[in-house]
Image (cartoon, rainbow, N blue to C red):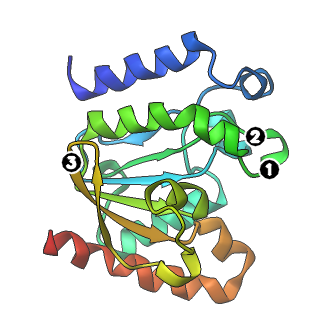
Amino acid sequence: MNQYEKLQALEAEIITQGVCPELKEQATQLVMGDGNPNADIVFIGEAPGKNEDEQGLPFVGAAGKFLNAMLAEADMDRSDVYITNIVKYRPPNNRDPLPEEKAAFWPYLVRQIEIINPKVIITLGRHSMEYFLPGQKIGQIHGHAKRISFGDHKLVIVPLYHPAAALYNGGMRQTLIDDFLRVPEVIKQI
């Protein structure tokens, strides 16, 4: 089985296992991920929003358009990276995912990462960052690469603010762009 087939099997397993049935019940569909299953870079957000739930793809709304623009500015293409979220179903009214929802999906995210086997994980927002860098504050470490042990692997984690934060807070937009534009240099150093 290749990576794509393994990811499809993992998606089917999440559905079969009935992970977070209360979220599944009110969502249109599971939003597993999108992009290159052999990517060196994986972006991880928190949970699908309305547009993502409707289209079945992560980061396709306003935050996704901003993410695509930053990828282009950093000379990266969305088809070269993999994009996912910790929680795979849309929380009602786009509320933050609950700790128990993140915990329920965490083992599947770990397996997703193991299948893709990236060199770099870019967390988008504090919800995904806290699982990789517990006890850290995004305001203090955003844009700074951190090496961690992840199972049998060493990974580089780059915590960034969530693109949606820049949409709601114009002052954060440039900070996120500046952090994002440092990512290619981090990758070269690896």
Q: Residues within 10 Å of mark 1 (few under 14, many from 20)?
A: few
| 152 shown above or below 17 | below
Q: Which residue is mark 1?
A: 95
**Alpha-carbon span between mark 2 and mark 1:** 6 Å
**Alpha-carbon span between mark 3 and mark 2:** 31 Å
Q: Kindly state the secondary structure of the residue where label 3 is placed.
A: strand
Query: Which is closer to the viewer, label 3 or label 1?
Result: 3
Q: How far from the left and from the top, in percent, is residue 103? A: 59, 38
Q: Residue furthest top?
A: 16
Q: Which residue is mark 3?
A: 153
Q: Which residue is mark 2?
A: 91
Q: Is residue 56 visible?
A: no
| 174 shown above or below 121 | below
Q: Nearer the viewer, residue 52 or 101?
A: 101
Q: Please state if 19 lies on the left or on the right of 115 as rendered.
A: right
| 104 shown above or below 163 | above
Residue depicted at x 62% and y 22%: 19
**Alpha-carbon span between mark 3 and mark 1:** 33 Å
Q: Which quadrant of the figure contains the N terminus?
A: top left
Q: Kindly state the secondary structure of the residue where label 2 is placed.
A: loop
Q: Kindly state the secondary structure of the residue where label 1 is placed.
A: loop
Tag 1: amino acid: Arg
Residue depicted at x 38% and y 79%: 144
Q: Which quadrant of the figure contains the C terminus?
A: bottom left
Tag 3: amino acid: His
Verify CB contact (< 8 Å) between mark 2 and mark 1.
yes
For residue 188, which quarter of the picture? bottom left
Tag 2: amino acid: Pro
* First-in-chain label (3 vs 2): 2
Q: How far from the left and from the top, in percent, is residue 67? A: 50, 64
